[in-house]
Amino acid sequence: MSNTVQEKTTLAAQPLAEPLPVHLRINGEDHRLQLRPWVSLLDALREYIGYTGTKKGCDHGQCGACTVLVDGVRINACMTLAVMRDGQEITTIEGLANGDKLHPLQAAFVEHDAFQCGYCTPGQICSAVGLIKEGRAKTRDDIRELMSGNICRCGAYTNIVDAIESVTGGTI
Amino acid sequence: MSSTNYVGKPVSRVDGYAKVTGQARYAVEHHVPNLLYGFIVNSAIAKGSVTTLDTSEALKVPGVVQVFTHKNTPSLAWFDRSYKDQDSVPGSPFRPLHSEKIRFSMQPIALVVAETFELARYASTLLKIEYKEESSSTNLSESLPQAHEAPKGKEGYMPPKSRGHAKKAFSAAPVKIQAEYIHGAEHHNPMEMHGSMAIYEKGGKLLVYDKTQGVANTQEYVKKVFGLSKDDVRVLSPYVGGAFGSGLRPQYQLFMAVLAALELKQSVKVSLTRQQMFSFGHRPKSLQRLALSAASDGTLQSIEHTCYSETSRFEDYTEVVVNWSGLLYQCANVELDYQLVKLDVYTPIDMRAPGAVTGIYALECAMDELAVALNIDPLDLRLRNYAPEDQNEKKPFSSKELRACYLQGAEKFGWNKRNKEPRSMREGNQLVGWGMASASWDAQQQKCAAKALLTPDGKLTVSSGTADIGTGTYTIMTQIAAETLGLPIEQVEFKLGDSSLPEAPLEGGSWTAVSVGSAVKATCEEVGQKLLKLAKKKKDSPLANAGAEDVVFENGYIILKKDPAAAVSILDIIRDEREDIEVESAAMPGMIDKLKYSFHSHSAVFAEVKVDEDLGTIHVTRVVSAIAGGRVLNPKTARSQILGAVVWGISMALQEDSVIDHNFGRFMNHNYAEYHVPVNADIQNIEVIFVEEEDDIINPLGAKGLGEIGIVGVAGAIANAVYHATGKRIRKLPIQLDNVLSEP
């Protein structure tokens, strides 16, 4: 069998959308940027501002590595465009510690060895901050269920639950 | 008192702070001026050639700098050997952008380079590509007649050795089973996608950040392929977001980033997408045939094990799959065979415990089937056929506490409460099943070098060009260095992931802790000897007559063993000296012991599953993993290694499967939504036991490495538990609800 396969023969370069002014408040600091509307919040953080603590694991909202808090709510930063977050308050992993003093969840993750490679860790911790704020998790099983948007390929799940539980004292 | 005796203590990760605060920077997270972004385009067909690759529309986009294809890539190294790396296998390594020929689906065919990521990605959609497609063959089961014997050539691969007369013993034995087991391909999918940054420096030198398990391997590859000198390329990889084997060979994004940086004389960053993480090496699909026979008391009479495993058209990837069946149990008649089948796929690559997870899964399921045929408890069957020595090599083990794993694991699990009958244990509509399996892995050591620098302020910096892919290398090396010189751990720093450091072996094979650890220990001991020499010279030194064997280094002091009051402060010695003490040294495995003994870690795994009788959903509710892995250097990170490996085993048993559509020769579920790995809710109780295992033969640390042993037995134990729960023997992985519901 031999046949010719063609693809993408009709596309022509289109004029690009112009950059727009975007004001993001990140970890308490103002950032005023000019961004094309196709820039995701994740890429804005990592590539345009330099907050690489927020990780890219799939860019499709499937892994949770890019979890940040927007006005206190946990979201996947890859699933939202930066221009949609104009004027909003964004907290990343870099904004959780108070100077050298770790956020209780950060300290608990170290103590309980709740990570190995560390790549999903910023997303896990931001997600756990959001989880606690939501007040929905009452049991260990609830934590497992409600942390299931954050994949850890190293498989540190039991330690992640231990770490979160140690901060909430077993009841959230 | 002995506060600086850190080895064996649950020290928290020394890189923990950097990782929980977001300060740890992975491969593509470095900021340099005038950085360009590369986006890779992959082939839509599995076999044939590119006939048209028109880049003109893409190049019209303002901000797009260049598009590299096979048509404009400069001629690079000619010979195959320039493309070989430390984990190469026999054959011709894949050369990106080398010609119009397509040899596997998603082969990279173009690199679009632009001023931003978004521009490069957009422009990549504007390429006009036409192919001449040839029919591809990716179906292992249908291609068995073309199988060939696996060649030697890859380090660690040993062709299987048979012994006795297995077929004769099989036909004469009273109890026997025969079965065929299949598992699909799997992709490593570390959380961090493969990425490289080639930073173009003054004078044309390159600083490369690469996601790799070996900076020296990356450096050597770049040097050879692009004709550079060693001084022209420095490779850094301080943090690696998981790899599990995918970073053992240089992947194509490295080639792309370096090519573009050299051609454009500008820094370039290239990261794969999650979809592209399915476009290079994977755990090969395998088909295995087992035949076991036993006397009616359970004594094994014969073991026959054949494996057919896939490889690419251009390389012969080999694993040690069937040899384990000659190792794990006492048996005089063993026939082993390992065959490769060439398909139109990319060359497979080592994935956590390569070969052993495949072979031991099948062997341990077959042992369970034999136990059922014999009406013997599966654990009893293992104990009855316990192998006190390595029969493949006819050598004693340096240590083997597998029996303790069986007994302690069984007790913790409550195995003696198991009702042998399938479908006999239930909770409401949940069928409860208990299964177990044994496991083994090599305990190897490789040559490794390290460097130590003790400065007058009492700070010790130890370094080696190894990697920490989440394994805990930073931490345990810091512990070993601090303990060897008796210094507080806060004063000790370990550096890795830099090709300018003393060379370490590839990070893999569970040999890093032992290989790098032995080098760190030897190097620090040499620093200790220099310190002792200086201490002896001090006025009225209490150590004036002490030899190396008369002292210990502890709590910041060199202390006379027979008179602990006679001690000299290490800080005083180095402060008075006012000069750095620097030592570079290396450690090698003991060759004589290597000839005399067999080195292996072992484990016993017990698993509980609950299968919903109506819906067929399978949950692993409990796993007990008992490990005999020598001395545990850090119980906290060691436990995490095993926990993670058990999660991998659960994943292999029930979830992971790279599904190929043979019409297109393409892995179709190439994303995290359709390629399932466990999420938090999938993982319930996991208990880890490290049994005492003393081994003063294997290496100076008495350790065996723990990265792989933890996964090996898990899938078999779970498959056996599913049988016990349901009475259905599913001989393929992953086991999914439709198998449980539909098969007899």
Image: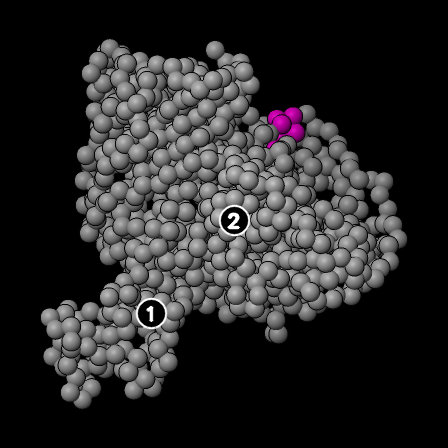
**Residue at 70% across, 53% down:** A70
Q: Position of residue A50 (x, y in %)?
A: 66, 63
Q: Is residue B116 found left or right of A17 in the rendered image?
A: left
Residue B13 locus on image (x, y percent)? 42, 58
**Image mark for residue B92:** none
Whether A71 is among the magenta residues is: no
Instruction: Count neighbours of disc 2 (C-alpha within 10 A) and say few if under 14, some if 14 to 19, many if 20 or more.
Output: some
The foreground one among B397 and A93 is A93
Camera-nearest residue between B416 and B362: B416
Could you tell me the amino acid type at mark 2?
A: Thr
Residue drawn 46% across and 24% down? B610
Find disc 1 in the rendering and name its residue: B488
- Hey, which residue is sitting farthest bottom in the picture? B539
The answer for which chain carries disc 1 is: B
**Residues rendered magenta in the picture:** B661-667
Task: Report the residue marked by disc 2.
Answer: A168
Residues B560 and B292: in front is B560
Is B663 a magenta residue? yes
Task: Tell me the SS state at disc 1.
Answer: loop
Asked where in the image residue A26 lies, by quadrant, the reply is bottom right
